[in-house]
Amino acid sequence: MTKYRINKTRFVDQTKTVSFTFDGKEYHGFEGDTLASALLSNGIHLVGRSFKYHRPRGIMSCGSEEPNAICQINDNTDLTEPNVRVTEIELYEGLKASSQNCWPSLNFDIGGINNLISPFIPAGFYYKTFMWPKSFWKKIYEPLIRLSAGLGKSPTQPDPDIYDHKHEHCDVLVIGGGISGIISAKIAAKNNLKTILIEDKNILGGSTIYQNNKHFIIDNQKSNEWLMNEISELEKLDNLIIKTRTSLAAFHSYNYLLAKENISDHLPLVKKNDGIRQRLWKIRADKVIVAAGAIERPLIFNNNDRPGIILANSVKKYLDFYGVSSGLNNIIFTNNDSAYETAVSLFEKGISVKIIDIRKKSSSNIVKNAEDLGIKIYWNSTVVNTFGYKKIKSIEIMNLSEDGSNVTGNKHKIQCDCLSISGGWTPMVHMHTQSGGKLDFREIDQVFVPSEKSENHINVGSCNGDFELEEIVKNTNNKVKKFLNINESGFDKISVLCSKELEKKNIWLLPNTISEGKTKSFIDFQNDSTAKDIKLALREGFKSIEHVKRYTTTGMATDQGKLSNMHALGIIADTAGVKMGTLGTTTFRPPFTPLTFGAIVGRSVGKFFDVVRKTSIHEWHVQNNAKFENVGQWKRPWYYPINNENLHEAVQRESKTARDSAGILDASTLGKIDIQGSDASEFLNRVYTNAWSNLGIGKCRYGLMLNEDGMVYDDGVTTRLGENNYLMTTTTGGAANVLSKLEDYLQTEWPELDVYLTSVTDHYSTASICGPNSKKILKKLFPNKDFSDEAFPHMSYQDAIIDKIECRIMRISFTGELSYEINIESKYAKSLWENCIKAGEEYKITPYGTETMHLLRAEKGFIIVGQDTDGTMTPIDLQMDWIVSKKKYDFIGKRSLYRSDTIREDRKQLVGLLTDDPNEILEEGAQIVSELDKKPVEMIGHVTSSYFSPNLNKSIALAVVKGGKKMKGQKLFVPMENKNINVTVSDFIFLDKENKRINA
Amino acid sequence: MFVINCPYCGERDQSEFSCGGEAHIVRPKQPTELSDDEWAEYLFMRKNIKGVQFERWNHAHGCRKWFNMVRDTSNDKIHAVYKMGEKPPVI
């Protein structure tokens, strides 16, 4: 037992010792401790350095509002975690913690020099200083700032922990397991409502669970005793789920809430293995009762940031909950009655305590209690300075003037080793405002309280601005009954006796004898923003609270200003001479406390990050050494290297063989939509630019689909399977969007059409065989079929049977070669593919991937929607006027084709480009210019597709160029980093312009 | 995140739906007879109201049906849902 472990409590098991290390040194605490209480029990206050001035900082609170005491947990490269609040870490065997933001060590930090030069680094220092010279930014300023930025260190290895997401539904969700949350949950659950109570600590009870003062009595028991009984009653209720270690992260509209449950963070290292670390609950609640409590405010005075300066109620919690005294010679500095409970509790345990109160008197029972015990109280006084570098040693106090705006009399120095401060309480209105609720400012105790009444959520207890025990209990009971339509509850006849605060006084920035410029009165402890920074911002013309916040960085640290925002507002209001309620607040955004990335993404990592779609022939591709390319969610074979070929070599071989003999492509990923209904032809007429009514049964046709703005949206071949039945193919990436768009038109614009759409992309797989020998291969596969041009012409389809399985053969071509596509039910596709390969063996049939497919179609000048188009190309821009019907009265996008913008002649238009050096391959995306000397250089277009064609033995490219249609033969330039490439505009069909090969 | 009462399926989470913008903009029956300005009015001009707005929604990850919804964009309160072709309610 250390000398600071004062008493035994029921919450810390002093028979179970837990060892841990802090900055490499081993210490001991007990089961039930937090890292903070264990450190304090070892007399350690100094745990970190501040962000800007590197001032020594200690533990200041006991919860999620902690601004100072944040540390690095664990030291391994994958599990280490920065910026963890020591007040929230439950102690476990083997815990390793270390301080942050200090070098070489916590005790000697070289960055502490910033504290000495602090007059030269005021608010906005970085914005003002690093403006010039401009050339210094990249090489000198930025690396320096980056070096000194940040707090802890991120892990460098992937997170090995498992995180989880879970949905939950309930009638009533109660946020906060303090006294008002417990009362609310009990009323709800006893009235047959499925209730969930969440609490971020490991046990229920809030601050009442350690309120052991004789002036706070419920039903003739001390309030903490009464509450213990209530908690044990609560645990017996069937339809109540209690989730401890679960903190609310976000409160969205329609009572949709996110809460993070810590599952293994508190377990000893040996027990953590393989389990889930944290779980994110996605809760939809019919009704929400917010009982989030209040946070104690600090007081703002000179040097109010030393280790050993702690919020008064936290000192009480460390004492009465953990059994640890934060100091042996205490001073309490307060503006309200609640800190007197801490004083009485310290005194009763025989620990020295004095009180400084800025009020002139207080006539409440608890204050009288302190006076009766003989505790020394300095009324109408304020602290003007504190001393002690790494821990507080003494303070100086002075009397306040009549109006509190100044100090009078002599300075009086008092020794101490702990200064408890209390500036009153701030209701936690975060949840209320996150859900869309508004706030009112209550003048008497300077707090923002929830105003609007929502039908679906209420605020109870101190987060609603009820601070006295009696009003907390009674108002909670009444509000909850009304909210849930309940007539009677077990709390109707409850008797509550409590000390009531009658005298209130608040001074946002306490006066001093020293001029403000020479004081360091911290408001935001983590980001080192002081009162003078805020005043400087106001002097420099910032008026909005949102601007002051960003300029001074007040409230922008990892604690999100839980302790600082109110004082910043108060000082702005005082300085600007406006009423505080009129300023508003900064926006409270989720999450309430930082969430781990793991909790946010849950299981959606690694192979679960996104859906992977594989064709039914995928296995074969893998076995045959295919390299894959991601196309949307699909894995498509990219190329099939043989004997260490690179991409270029493989593609050259594949495309040569495809043109000279035969090639085979897995085209299963193309979107396929089955269209049926008596108006199917009319429907196609309306969605494609060309005419469809005249397409014979058994014929195929290429179609171009536009958006209503006239820009090309999708393309593909559609086959007429029957009188009222078509099979549409779409691009691989566009399949889902095309179906949605077509459904939209059918349902909303043309509900009179008798048309039904079904996606059959996954149902059929496609093997596409091309090349001069493809017909011979097909003949081997389907010996009974007549493949003559007369019986089976280009752009037609026939049913066929292979191995007793029905399939469809389409004679269509995306390569310009004689080409057949065989569609078969997906489960037979691999066997079909293998048959094709076998039949093609004697012709050296080569499987080819997307890269060769792109090359082959580019030789023929066929566009790829999404590569050669980008949502700004009309069919006219693509020189595809032939596909736009002049006769049809209307189709999607028709009217837009002659808007003043789309008929401009200087639009970017599709052209071919040939490099003067036939071996020079252009880069896709490269910019095209017509004049090299003109400055600024005007970009007139860019390269969309570019390849070396083995069949033409030269480099070819497709490009879009302003006014390109009329530029054939013109010389242009493609400027690259170290050279200019000379190119000539050409036709964009490079091979077989006469379409002879298709019938070869 | 809202709960939307799909007129075909009932109450479902917002994540199942996608929003299709302003409702009751009818595609002109005879686009060829419109001037550039009139066509542009249909094609581009959309209101973005702070307050009660009539919107198209699609139960994209459900029945895939389109329907209309009246929503207050300032507080996300949904006043009504109704099927395509039905008369908009008076709010």
Image: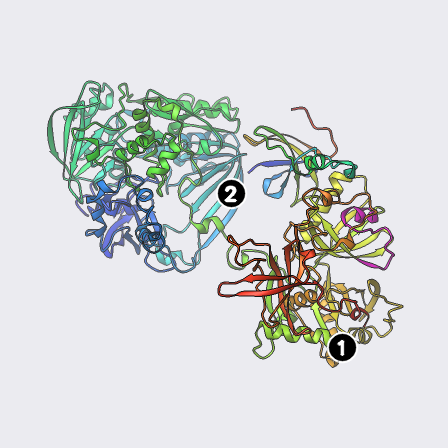
Give the residue displayed 80% in from the left and 46% down from the top.
A755
Displayed quadrant of residue A79: bottom left
Identify the residue at the far front of this view.
Answer: A933
The mark total stands at 2
Give the farthest residue toward the bottom.
A842
Image point (63%, 42%), residue name: B18
The subunit carrying tag 2 is A
Residue A843 horizontal side relative to residue B53, left or right: right
Between A231 and A63, the one nearer to me in the picture: A63
Q: For residue A282, which numbered disc appears in the image? A: 2
Q: Residues in magenta? A: A680-701
Determine which quarter of the picture holds residue A546. top left
Q: Position of residue A511 (x, y in %)?
A: 21, 27
SS at circle 2: strand
Callouts 2 and 1 on one subunit? yes
Q: Is residue A744 left or right of residue A404?
A: right
Is label 1 in a helix, a strand or a loop? helix
Say whether residue A686 is magenta. yes
User: Between residues A612 and A901, which one lies in front from this camera angle?
Assistant: A901
Along the horizontal axis of the image, is A513 left or right of A999? left
Q: Residues within 10 Å of mark 1 (few under 14, many from 20)?
A: some
Q: Does A199 sit above or below residue A874?
A: above
| Horizontal and vertical percent position of residue A833 | 72, 71
Q: Quadrant of the C terminus of chain A?
A: bottom right
Is A724 within the magenta? Answer: no
Q: Mark 1 points at which residue?
A: A839
Amino acid type for the residue under numbered disc 2: Lys
Relative to residue A408, is residue A538 drawn left or right?
A: right
Query: Does label 2 or label 1 sit earlier along the sequence?
Result: 2
Q: Can residue A454 be seen in this view?
A: yes
